[in-house]
Structures are given as structure tokens and as C-alpha cells.
Amino acid sequence: MLSLGIVGLPNVGKSSLFNALTAAKAEAANYPFCTIDPNVGVVNVPDPRLEKLAEIVNPERTVPAAVQFVDIAGLVKGASTGEGRGNAFLSNIRETDAIVHVVRCFDDDDVIHVDGSVDPVRDRATIEFELALADLSVVEKRLDKAKRAAKTGDKDAAAEVSSLEKAHKPLSDGQALWHVSLTAEDRERLKGLQLLTLKPILYAANVTDSELTGAEGKHVTALRAAIAADHEPAEVVTFSAKIEMELAELPPEDRKEFLASLGIESAGLDRLIRGGYSLLGLQTYFTAGEKEVRAWTIHKGDTAPKAAGVIHSDFEKGFIRAETVSYADFVAHNGWKGAREKGLARAEGKEYVMVDGDVVLFRFNV
Ligand code: GDP
């Protein structure tokens, strides 16, 4: 499951967003851990294709893909130096795939900004600094160990020291690791540390609601320019926490109409999820049987066995072939039977590279 960690300064709209997310939450029974941990919310990935497939197959149950959001308490300036409290919060998001940085881009004199004014470019730098310092303490601890091991003649440890030192310099200057060019070997060696500033970032710009339909405001424009100037590998998604909260209070069947009445195409949550998929190069395939119609998340470029492995590792190990129909063919010919009759169900082997929307039936040895 795609997992996103939410960070941002206090008062930027994180809780509003997270509460809206959890109000729209996925079937809690499917994800028992999120009812235990108040900082974890699991939401369904909205995908109209899944509903269409369910209409055709009429299964016992329909299971959407899901995304996990992990919230940390507000990150304040100096968090990473203050008794390690900030670090403790940040450790909650070390295991996520990407970071959602909520930045305030709405003007509202009634909502105080911790740094006195609305300035997403400054806020971006503040958070980068805190994340870098949090990574620095992880790198320093590891570096101590690796250096000691290297002294005993351990070659792997010596290589690790060299990678860690490359990371150490920028981090101690408060710079994120995306500024540095690291080799594939460096990345491999640093992977286990789950460094925050090596994760892709999705900026969630909390804008004044009128900006969602009208021209983009100056704050978002400035934020985009700063990201582009630094060549930061990140995406920007706009949303309004205010509208998300209003949406969350409505029954699901009324949400579309509410958005349409405002002239907004999609909910912020949808855009966030789509942004996450695009940032991480993810795509979807479907299984469509009478018991269950279900969406699965894989990476672009994944082969059929890899895709099978997302269902169960045994499917990958014992993979024989994947009976595959494109989503369009499946819908046009009303399901498996029609598609097979037209010869549109292909038997794909181990080398097959999955296409977004493929409807698949795996054959495997157990
Ligand atoms: P957090 O500290 O980042 O979790 O921020 P909150 O979600 O608690 O929001 C802080 C304050 O800003 C609250 O009073 C919210 O109602 C308000 N707020 C959040 N999003 C918006 C927004 O999009 N527009 C306006 N005008 N106020 C917002």
C-alpha cells in the first residue's frame, strides 16, 4: 500500500486535511491498525474504472486500492534540536514512500502564521532544514558505527563510510539530500536508514478556495518557481482544507454535486492521491472474479510476475502466465467471456510489462 507522511508547520491546515481524510476513510475492518493508531488514516483510491468493472462482473465484494496517510504533530522551527522531540515525531514517517508537505498558501488574518506572514517559499526552507537535521542525527550515529567497523578492516564498512560522508556534508549545512548527486551504490548503502530528505516530496498547497477555480495565486506561483529554480524532484498539488472539511461532512453520494456546484473538478484528496501515484511512478491493474473485483497498485514498468507478487509472494514464485485483457476491451465486450470470444484475452508470460488498467487472471504453480 502506498504510504504518505504528512509534514508541515503548525496552523497550515494539516489537521483539517487529515481529519477530512479520515472522515472519508476506507472500511476500517480491512485496516485494523488504523483504528488503533490515531495518526494513521487509510483511504480508498477513487477509481471509476473499478466501479465499472464491478457493474459488469457483479462480484460479492469490490476492493479499491488504498493509500495510508501518516500524520505527525506540527513540526516547529528548531524541532530537530529541541531534546529530540521533533525527531521522535519524524520517526513515525520514516517508513513512508513519500512526504506530503502541507504549505499554507491561503490568506486569512484570523489564522495566525507561526512566522508572522504567509510565505510558502520560506516555509519550504524551514521544513527542509528540520528534515535535514533529523537525517543528520541518523547519519551521524551510523557513521560512528561504520567508522569503527572500517578500522577493523571491514571493506563494506569502509564503502559505507564514504557514502555516509557524502550525505553528512549537505545535511550538516541543513540541506536536503536531493541537492547532492549520489551514485546508485550510495543510495543502496543509505537505503536502510530511511532518510527523509531522500524521499520524493509532494507539496500540498492549501489555497484560498476561489483559487481552485480561478487564476493561481501569487503564493503558489512563488512556491512553484522556488522548486523549479532548485530542480527539486517534487510535485505541487493545490487543495483547500476548508473545502475538504465541508466535503467530508457530506454523504459520499452528494460530494460530486457539491464540487460541481463550486466548479471544482475533483476533491483535493483525489488530486493528492493522483499526485502521489505520478510522483512515485505507480499504476493500477485489476483482478475481476465473481468473488472479488479488486484494484492493485504496482510500479510502471513492472512485469507480470512482479504484479502477481503484490497479491501474494507465492504467485510471483510460481508464476506461469497472466491471462490479460485491456480495461477498454474488457468493458467493450462485457467481461471475460466476451473478451475471450473475440480473442482479446492474451496469455502473457514472465517478460510481459504491465499496462495501466490491465485486467488479469494469474496462473501459477503452488
Ligand atoms: P495544523 O496546525 O497544520 O494542523 O492546522 P489546522 O488544520 O489545525 O488549521 C489551523 C487553522 O487554520 C484552523 O483554524 C483552520 O480552521 C484554519 N484553516 C485551515 N485550512 C484553512 C483554509 O483553507 N482556509 C482558511 N481560511 N482557514 C483554514
Image: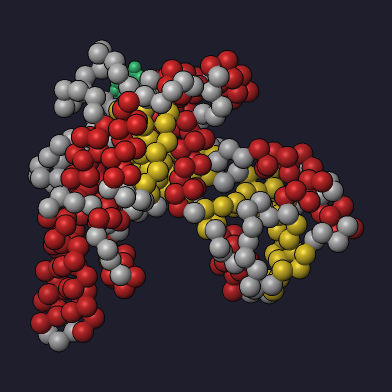
The residue most toward the right is 341
Is residue 30 found left or right of 62 in the rendered image?
A: left
Please identify the quarter of the rendering in which residue 45 is found: top right
Q: Residue at x 84, y 48 (%)?
A: 333
Does 148 appear above or below 231? Answer: below
Does 117 appear above or below 96? Answer: above
Q: Residue at x 15, y 37 (%)?
A: 77
Q: Residue at x 40, y 43 (%)?
A: 235
Is residue 175 found left or right of 97 in the rendered image?
A: left
Q: Residue at x 43, y 28 (%)?
A: 239
Please identify the quarter of the rendering in which residue 266 is found: top right
Please provide percent x and percent y for residue 169. Answer: 13, 61
Please provide percent x and percent y for residue 13. Answer: 33, 27
Residue 60 visible in the picture: no
The residue most toward the top is 110
The residue most toward the bottom is 153
Residue 210 visible in the picture: yes
Ligand 1 shows up in which quadrant of the image? top left
Please provide percent x and percent y for residue 213. Answer: 49, 22
Q: Quadrant of the C terminus?
A: bottom right
Please provide percent x and percent y for residue 153. Answer: 15, 87
